[in-house]
Image: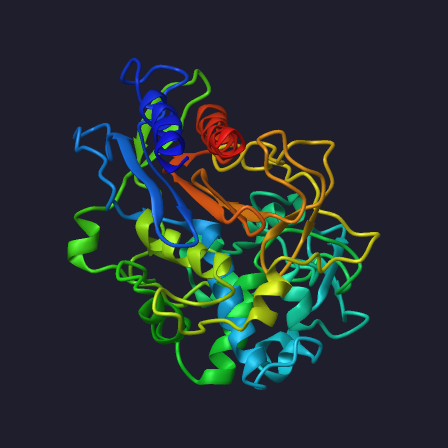
Amino acid sequence: MSDKLAAAVDAVVQSVSRGPVSGEGRVPGVVAGVTDRDSDIYLGASGVRDLSSGAAMTTDSVFNIWSTTKAITGAACLQLVESGDLDLQAPAKEYAPALADVQVIEGFDADGQPVLRAPASDLTTHHLLTHTAGFGYDFFNETYLRLAQEHGQPSVATASRAALRTPLLFDPGTRWEYGSNIDWAGQVVEGITGKRLGEVCQERIFEPLGMTCSTFAPSEEMLARKVRHHQREEDGTLTPSDFAAPIEPEVDFGGHGLFSTVPDYLRFIRMWLNEGRNGAGEQVLSPASVDLGFRNQLPDHLRVTMLPGVIKALSNDAEFFPGLEKTWSYTFQYTQDPFPTGRPTGAIGWAGLANLYYWIDRDNGFGGYWATQILPFADGPAFTGFVDFETAAYDAVAKG
């Protein structure tokens, strides 16, 4: 089955980067992998890291992994729950004092100034990890976009402390809104440990899992292997872009700031498939914490919703298979209704801004990661390639 799966998914990986250099429907380059509980079943690459130089994509290429960072920060939080240092239901301001000053924005007055009020209740780390605290993103929310355009609110992509200081869009726990919540969860980790988030991840996650190329501040050697971002223009062509996360961030943003490789991320996926153990059998997360990742954490009246692309250069309207019910766990999208790819109820996964995607299926014992660096998010060719990749993997498992 492993050989058949590898052949099936490799056919997808090799096909997506073929075609005219700037033609519609092409992905400049991709690295993708599939792992079972024991090891990588498949790891492959196609295309180029940079259309302007023609440098070949390789399996050790380095990516801004954007929001696929979130699950790693979530794992760091769960470790602190295990140690008794973090109460997910306690006010998060107890760990990140800056949250004491956060207010809810109700709109703008006649002069265009924000109308703010105190939240009806304290937000908790549970709210942060489930995207129910009230924070948003300017590329998915018109109110945040107006704050950026009219009031100089920095983008989270700057990884600056000022970028964290945004108001809540609603009272904690009353809605689901995808946003900078897990950036703040990273601040909770820092407040508890007294260390930068990157140090915590290195000591407690990367080193135990053998993730040697994952960091918020990449070395020169890593930068030499970094994939360049490309912009999908309105006519479908691709243009090399200088958009990227900062390599010396003021703040380690737990929601999007990591640089990594596909082999490293597959090690992280494998830990979830192995009840929290690394390759040596040591517990990185407890089985109870792993269970929390494979369990819906939203109440019945809240569900994952479509992400409206309000900054078209950064994102299209985005949703995994509209019409299917999706919820949220700690800290993944939880598959409530099975996906047409073959992904069953109970599997988890998510995505990153530059069209990175992954899934983790504990019941079937495998998961996969698909990495590109293309904007806007929910790019047609990149997302379709991932869907074909996942479908090919599930088809091989079904036939095997």
Q: Is residue 260 left or right of residue 341?
A: left
109 or 91: nearer the eye?
A: 91
Q: Residue at x 80, y 59 (%)?
A: 174
Q: Residue 80: horizontal and vertical position, in percent?
A: 53, 79
251 or 358: nearer the eye?
A: 358
Reply above or below: 270 against 341: below
Placement of the N terminus among the 4 image quadrants? top left
Q: Does residue 166 appear in this view? A: no
Q: Residue at x 27, y 17 (%)?
A: 21
Q: Residue at x 56, y 32 (%)?
A: 316
Q: Is residue 255 left or right of residue 49?
A: right
Q: Residue 170: horizontal and vertical position, in percent?
A: 76, 59
336 or 148: nearer the eye?
A: 336
Reply above or below: 270 against 356: below
The count of marks equals 0
Q: Is residue 125 left or right of residue 380?
A: right
Q: Residue at x 20, y 60 (%)?
A: 219
Q: Does residue 340 appear in this view? A: yes
Reply above or below: 60 against 48: below
